[in-house]
Amino acid sequence: MLNVPSQSFPAPSSQQRAASGGRSKVPLKQGRSLMDWIRLTKSGKDLTGLKGRLIEVTEEELKRHNTKDDCWICIRGFVYNVSPYMEYHPGGEDELMRAAGSDGTDLFDQVHRWVNYESMLKECLVGRMAIKPTVPKDYREEKKVLNGMLPKTQVTDTLTKEGPGSPSYDWFQTDSLVTLVIYTKQKDINLDSVIVDHQDDSFRAETIIKDYSYIIHIGLSHEIQEDFSVRVIENVGKIEIVLKKKENTSWKRLGHPLENHNSLIPKKDTGLNYRKCQLISKECVTHDTKLFCLMLPPSTHLQVPIGQHVYLKLTITGTEIVKPYTPVSDFLLSELKEPVLNNKYIYLLIKIYAAGLFTPELDHLQIGDFVSVSNPEGNFKISQFQELEDLFLLAAGTGFTPMVKILNYALTNIPSLRKVKLMFFNKTEDDIIWRSQLEKLAFKDKRFQVEFVLSAPTSEWNGKQGHISPGLLSEFLKRSLDRSKVLICICGPTPFTEQGIRLLQDLNFSKDEIHSFTA
Ligand code: FAD
Ligand code: NAP
């Protein structure tokens, strides 16, 4: 079955999401980096062999283009000639060939849904599948205006059988305020669960309910002020979003429905949704790692949950490039800084790779410049901390980033916790992020211990050396009690993480006791 999009042709702006499984990069030939690819796409060379024409592609035609030299792939109903891209694909030619002459949407989504293929492959676009698009479910709905809650039938229309019970919404008003109420019917809802954006007259609230998103998306009938407040009544799973009217008039209706309004869709099928955030500060942390502080627009409510990442998007020489980053909190810096209202800021510790594509560009941003930030993604769950007694963190390089919020949360919120140990792998002493802050924390909180392991130390280093190994791990992972409840979090370069997981399994830790961070 081909995945044909219902939206207009050509594809609108990209909506990308994170893949949950990791993937290995293959070494690329000289001159085949992403930047080289972007240069080729800008060279004016005819990459489809169709001299700029877009065609309608039948299934039979698609099937015929199934060799390395003539390879067409369909993604979400659009067909690309990926032969010229083969040598530039970080996952290798074989991975691309798995979808040759067929619909690669599902394969693509499994591995790298967040990659902005519309922008990266736009010069390879052959055309669209010659199949009539299906009528969107909410077609009739779009013709109507909203007058409060939609009839129940329309809500349940969009629910899938295995999803959570049907959420719903309602609204009411006073002279100056409009309150939108979302009834999730779930108990584990908190302020992290709801992401609200208001731009021009478009108002969008996405509530994460287990693996689903419940979306309210409305073209408001009247103007509202930029800022709004969000409250969650946790024990009943009710969310209240209080909007301030620009004028004190009575609203007869809330507005008209926009894309996906009042629908509950699997999270993996929703777009990522970006908003522009302003760079507020940029401070050196090590010789190559910087702490970026981004400010969310006043018309956005977004909190990145512990262990989750966001995608940053920049346009680099005309191509939209997206990379994942894991926000940190400033709790390790709190002695040095005035506390700030964290829910308006996103802090990112980012290593700048001189030969990298994205990070040098990010580093060139000036204070006051904007960068697009996506909704959060990730599979870490706070429930993994329940009754936890021993927490072990294994981090390599910037793989330290998810550990920052985890450390803070665990030390502050888990009464059962007896021990938290961080083993932090780096090349040299100069590469260690927030070393003195970690040492201070260990001094202050006796439950916390930190060990640094260096792979390329100077002769003065008298700490641990080498790479992740059975010896290092078995000595490090000592439980506080024989059968204590344990969680081990691991993050770093993919081969480090993969090797670490193998070693942990060899040491008889179960899958439930290991959490690895990947994208
Ligand atoms: P790239 O262009 O990707 O290059 C990086 C380096 O690898 C360069 O030295 C380059 O020469 C080399 N290279 C690139 N491709 C290949 C190849 N095929 N073969 C061999 N060498 C190659 N990073 C952070 O700093 N902070 C974070 O908080 C953070 N969070 C992340 C969260 C997740 C879920 C994931 C998956 C990654 C995270 N990263 C984080 C890494 C980040 O997403 C980028 O990969 C990183 O910033 C490098 O981007 P770049 O475009 O600048 O470099
Ligand atoms: P780095 O400085 O290159 O490496 C850090 C340490 O890991 C070094 O001691 C290094 O040893 C060691 N190491 C590297 N590869 C290894 C391997 N195959 N086996 C064992 N040890 C290995 O790291 P970095 O540049 O900061 O990169 C951090 C990585 O973490 C990036 O790949 C980034 O994508 C990833 N990351 C992932 C997430 C996530 O949530 N998934 C979040 C943040 C970062 P050597 O000296 O031998 O290289």
Image (spheres, grey):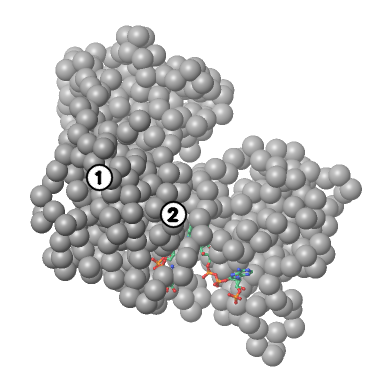
**Mark 2 to mark 1: distance in Å?**
17 Å
* In-image side of 324 versus 69 (left or right): right
The three-letter amino acid code for the residue at tag 2 is: Glu
Amino acid under disc 1: Val
Q: Position of residue 477 (x, y in %)?
A: 79, 58
Q: Secondary structure at mark 1?
A: strand
Q: Quadrant of residue 181?
A: top left
Q: Nearer the viewer, residue 345 or 218?
A: 218
CB under 8 Å between callouts 2 and 1? no
Q: Which mark is residue 79?
A: 1
Location of mark 2 (residue):
95
Q: Position of residue 211 (x, y in %)?
A: 50, 32
Going from the N terminus, do you reach mark 2 or mark 1 first?
Answer: 1
Residue at the outermost bottom position: 459
For the point 35% across and 30% down, the residue is 1
| Camera-side residue of 38 and 518 | 38
Ligand 2 picture quarter: bottom right
Q: Please name the residue shown 46% across and 70% down the image.
A: 27
Q: Is residue 16 above or below residue 36?
A: above
Mark 2 surroundings: few (<14), some (14-19) or many (≥20) residues within 10 A: some
Measured as percent of width and height from the top left, residue 5 is found at 26, 34
Q: Is residue 136 above or below residue 153?
A: below
